[in-house]
């Protein structure tokens, strides 16, 4: 599978997003598992899920968003992921 991004579903990533608060801006980091990449071309987006206090929190970003500073791949899955969308992902508590 050839892709133009450096991550795939199942990877643990850190998304650095620029947040604008009035006149100040800061970078917020969201770390979790990529559970879906969908779309084609410029309309491509990806979805990341993390656990906060036993509750799953998901965020969706356009892949070419100017608000994303960078996406770091923290770790790859131990086994090969055989799905494009991991909708029933059970993360450890």
Image (spheres, helix red, strand yellow):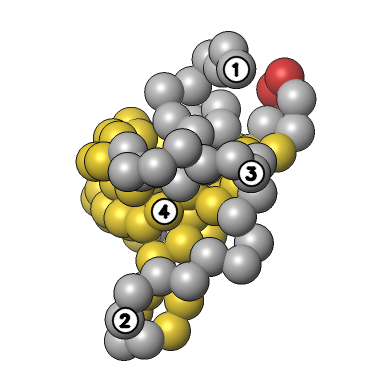
Mark 3, residue position:
83
Mark 2, residue position:
93
What is the spatial separation of the Cα atoms under label 2 and label 3, in whole angstroms? 22 Å
Q: Decide if residue 66 is in sight here.
A: yes
Residue that sits furthest to the front in the current view: 79
The residue that appears at 34% across and 74% down in the rendered structure is 92
Residue 48: percent from the left, percent from the top?
A: 48, 54
Mark 4, residue position:
33
Which callout, 2 or 4, points to the residue nearer the camera? 2
Q: Secondary structure at mark 3?
A: loop
Q: What label sits on residue 1 in the rendered view?
A: 1
Query: Is disc 1 in contact with disc 4, using a CB cutoff of under 8 Å?
Result: no
Q: In terms of sequence position, does the residue under pointer 1 or pointer 2 come before the other?
A: 1
Label 3: how many residues lie within 10 Å, few (<14), some (14-19) or many (20+)? Answer: few
Residue 27: percent from the left, percent from the top?
A: 26, 48
**Quadrant that contains the N terminus:** top right
């Amino acid at each position: 599978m050839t892709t133009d991004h450096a991550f795939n579903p199942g990877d643990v990533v850190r998304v650095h997003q620029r947040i604008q608060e009035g006149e100040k801006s800061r970078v917020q980091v969201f770390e979790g598992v990529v559970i879906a990449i969908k779309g084609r071309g410029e309309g491509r987006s990806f979805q990341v899920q993390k656990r906060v206090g036993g509750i799953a929190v998901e965020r969706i970003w356009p892949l070419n968003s100017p608000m994303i500073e960078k996406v770091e791949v923290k770790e790859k899955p131990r086994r090969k992921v055989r799905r494009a969308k991991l909708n029933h992902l059970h993360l450890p508590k």
